[in-house]
Amino acid sequence: MTGITFSDKYRRIATEEAWAPQEMMDMYRDLYESGKLDDPGFSSLWGFYGSSNEPRPVTVRRKLADLDDERLHDMDAAGIDFAVLALTSPGVQVFDRDTAIRVASDSNDMVKEAVDRHPDRYAALCAVAPQAPEVAAQEIQRCQALGFRGIIINSHTHGEYLSDSKFWPIFEAAEALDMPVYLHPNTPPKAMIEPMLEVGLDGAIFGFGVETGLHMLRIITAGVFDHFPKLQFIIGHMGEALPYWMYRLDFMHNAQVTSKRYEALKPLKKKVSDYLKENVYITCSGMAWEPAVRFCQQQIGIDRTMYAMDYPYQYVLQEVIDLDNMAIPDAEKKMFYQDVAEKVFKLS
Amino acid sequence: MTGITFSDKYRRIATEEAWAPQEMMDMYRDLYESGKLDDPGFSSLWGFYGSSNEPRPVTVRRKLADLDDERLHDMDAAGIDFAVLALTSPGVQVFDRDTAIRVASDSNDMVKEAVDRHPDRYAALCAVAPQAPEVAAQEIQRCQALGFRGIIINSHTHGEYLSDSKFWPIFEAAEALDMPVYLHPNTPPKAMIEPMLEVGLDGAIFGFGVETGLHMLRIITAGVFDHFPKLQFIIGHMGEALPYWMYRLDFMHNAQVTSKRYEALKPLKKKVSDYLKENVYITCSGMAWEPAVRFCQQQIGIDRTMYAMDYPYQYVLQEVIDLDNMAIPDAEKKMFYQDVAEKVFKLS
């Protein structure tokens, strides 16, 4: 133990906590070594995390695969009461259709067992294969019945985005079953990565945010929330900078739609920022930084901003201490750590 | 006139104000129609602004080419006392080397004449051809002697970034002559644009920020400010979201450098955020939004955050009124509108 005593004024719920079956990481290594996947971002990410013997990737691999003693010990040491588990990026989305369907289902069964072993510590998000939207919709239904609390999507699938209506059976199921969708980063696809990759900026330092911010914005501008008004998304990393961009998103969306610059950019029922405030929750994964947390609380909403650690990629005890010490009222801190997560994931 | 009376507690200096010789816009149209430039972003941007008969592009074209009556009238109507003029994006950076050198020099002569006609209303930034770094360095020297107050770079040049050391003669001249570099957006290059372009998000709504934020970050992580510690940059649009990302930039830069993930990502003398606070000024072009202005003032510095209108692309009188009404002390408002610009561009 660390000897740190954490305040017990609220239950700390961490909402973007990664895990991976060892079998899936082995498949990643085989896929990388086969050279068969034409995805430089995958090669960059899992060429490193899957094979490197540096301390960071070795630790990440071991902690990703553990759903019992080490993880629970780490949670205790950091004052984390409860974790919402999600299959790590890029999940099954790099596999072929049939493999993706199988690994999604197997991994869901596996994480369900961990939740059953530790029901007071874990809930889980359901992994799906966007490669097969109708099957994904069925898997969402199966998982919802098993007690899963949402869906994890690790951004693009072979360079395709959920803004494409062929994927919308996933949204139809998610909305009907009241299952929120956590849109988690992946490296940018081949058509976008090179100017970032060539200088080592394709990953969590920058590319992740570009990829995931773009994906969320594509979903909004495609009119997904006009079609599925009750659908709720969650994005991490303090909203992938979209809250900061809200003014410009609204101004330029209106300017481009009005001037008919793009066939693809259609009028929407609301402003871009309205969807961010009504259909999107924000977590602080990777951004344990009071100024950004407060910016989101003020601009998106105190009732839409919540805590995430991003374990095991960012297991930093000091971050919990810093967030505990934010200069906001206790009631708002409880919303941040506990109430918002309990509501969106139905945890109370 | 609009009949609006603006406060005269400070001089309003607008620092990212675009202009273009009619000849250059004609060359853009010819280049676009020739199909010879393999740059989908240029085709998207100037295929629209150069040819469309919608009200927005027609107005933008006319106002870009005017450096006298219409522009001064518009400035008066919006309470703008003084404008720092810059050659509009993508400047000369889409031309071949020799054409770029010639058009840069000609456009600098032309804007110099406008400054001479209206010395109490305008200063100008020097356009250069990064295609010829040594010639660009000479042009910076020539322009500095003519009274130019900085350098305009419209992001990538044929897909290349100033992080590449072959461009560093430009930085050497800029630092030696104390000429700040305004890094202005362009559309992303071919290697990055497709997932944005196919849904109409390649321009000012999103792609501009990705491109320019990446470019600034590439310059920082390449160690440019370790080589040229006195060099000063200016980035618009409230810092292209980099101020919002500072915590993650620092954390992940350190994590990647420590774990030796990339050959290209080297240790730096300071944190990424230190360079943003010590070598970068921020303007509010396109982001006339108090929460973002205050975020930058607080996180980057009151002495590094300044006003820009982004004329003629965002000529919105209400934005000046909104910024005039920000809930900050008058002394800080004067810094925002006047003092910081006077210092960085040596205008007082």
Image (tube, coloured by chain):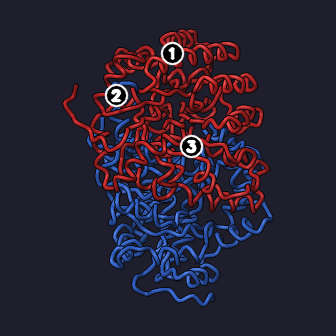
Chain colours: A blue, B red
Q: Which residue lies at the image location 42% right of the left edge and 36% below the top edge? A: B13
- Letter of the chain that mark 3 sits on in the rendering: B
Give the quadrant of the N terminus of chain B: top left
- The residue that label 3 is drawn on is B213
B307 relative to B140 in the view: left or right: left
**Amino acid type indicated by mark 1:** Glu
Residue extending farthest to the left is B3
Q: Mark 3: few, some, or many residues within 10 Å (few <14, many ≥20)?
A: many
Q: Which numbered disc, 1 or 3, marks the residue that appears first in the sequence? A: 1
Q: Secondary structure at mark 3?
A: helix
Q: Kindly identify which residue carries mark 2.
A: B75
- Mark 2 and mark 3 lie on one chain; the one further toward the N terminus is 2
Amino acid type of disc 2?
Met
**Do badges 1 and 3 share one subunit?**
yes
Label 1's element? helix
**Between A148 and B220, which is closer to the camera in this rendering?**
B220
Amino acid residing under circle 3: Gly
Residue at 61% of width from left, 18% of height from top? B104
Give the CA distance from mark 2 to mark 3: 29 Å
Left or right of A157: which side holds B286? left
The residue nearer to you, when weighing B335 against B137, is B335
Q: Residue at x 54, y 55 (%)?
A: B245
**Which percent across, then down, holds residue A252?**
38, 35
Q: Return the residue at label 1.
A: B113
Residue A347 visible to an observer of this rendering: no
Chain under label 1? B
